[in-house]
Image (cartoon, rainbow, N blue to C red):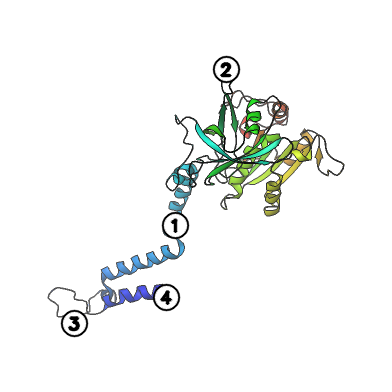
Amino acid sequence: MLARQAFKTVQPLTQNVRLYASDSGVRQRRPWGKYSAYGFGGIFTFWVVLRGIVVYQKGPDAVLSPAQKAAKMKEEAAGKTGSLDKVSNVVFKGGDQGFVDLKLESVEQVNHNTKKFRFAFPNPDDVSGLHTTSALVTKYQGPEMDKPVIRPYTPTSPDDVKGHMDFVIKKYENGPMSTHIHNMEPPQRLEFKGPISKYPWSPNKHDTITLIAGGTGITPMHQLCQAIFSNPEDKTKVNLIYGNIAEEDILLKQEFQHLENMYPQRFRAFYLLDKPSDTWTQGTGHVTQEILKTVLPEPKEKDFKIFVCGPPGMYKALSGMKKSPAEQGELSGMLKEMGYSEDQVYKF
């Protein structure tokens, strides 16, 4: 119906058109045939109206060329926080912004030593400003501390969620920051700073990625999975190897089970336990070369990446420790012994 209305608005231009100011109003034929009836102005008007209909029905991207669409997608992927900044307030801007004080909104017990903490942003429409993959650092100085304690944490809530962000945090014995956070109650406040950029992700950056995690090292892996499987354009295949002490220590298991059910051809999870129950049917013990061989692509294959995040013992056994928070350091351990190179492995 919109197309018929558009044609009717253009149709009067085909009647009683004066070709010159001296014309009497009687239609005259010209050598260029039927196009004289419309006039160039009418043809242009008709094109503009039809273009408007396409935009109305399919959105503004419908009239972009393939090259323009690709450029727009690349721009949005590279500057996600920039596009969010136009419609929302970004809480964490990086640079010399300093620490941001946030209020604890709620606490949820996850297991015997882990809780989920929700911190509220200053305004309901605020977004974190984080990107995949990135983290925040927290700061706390107790009354008897000579200097503040600073620790990094990766949120488990999506980067673009508004009004709050969630953290799943395990309490470590003699861990000053995790102990302080576990002792917090709403509406106490905690200082955060960031984002701290890690491995920059863009859709289909690799054909396949393998995530090897231990304990709370699962949180950056979860952030990566969120970005991949929430984007219809991203077709990356993901393998997860996740080690823990006991079954109750497996964090975010429901979220990963959901991915397995929704994307059985693209997501697989392998769980390992040090202390399995009698009913446990999956892997036991630590990550071994035999397990890695069943999951990882061959070193000679192309376009894959291996990510490692976990306790120090896992790093030493698999990939070697990072040289510093900003430097990967040399590759060692099982992955080097199996023939993988430094550019194929990333240590969170």
Identify the residue position indicated by label 3 in the image.
26
The image quarter containing residue 334 is: top right
Label at residue 1: 4
Mark 1 or 2: the one toward you: 2
The amino acid at mark 2 is Asp
The amino acid at mark 3 is Val
Instruction: Classify 10 Å Cα crowding around label 3: few (below 14), some (14-19), many (20 and above).
Output: few
Label at residue 146: 2
Identify the residue position indicated by label 1 in the image.
61
The amino acid at mark 4 is Met
Q: Nearer the viewer, residue 22 or 233?
A: 233
Mark 3 or 4: the one toward you: 4
User: Where residue 73 sits: x, y (%)?
Assistant: 48, 49
The amino acid at mark 1 is Asp
User: Where residue 155 sits: x, y (%)?
Assistant: 59, 39
Q: Which of 293 and 248 is in front in this view?
A: 248
User: Could you tell me how far apart the alpha carbons at marks 3 and 4 are, in whole angstroms?
Assistant: 32 Å
Q: Residue at x 66, y 33 (%)?
A: 309
Task: Tell me whether the residue at label 2 lies in contact with that at label 3, contact meaning CB atoms closer than 8 angstroms.
Answer: no
User: Could you tell me how far apart the alpha carbons at marks 1 and 2 are, in whole angstroms?
Assistant: 56 Å
Q: Which of 291 and 197 is in front in this view?
A: 197
Task: Tell me whether the residue at label 1 lies in contact with that at label 4, contact meaning CB atoms closer than 8 angstroms.
Answer: no
Q: In which quarter of the image is the N terminus?
A: bottom left
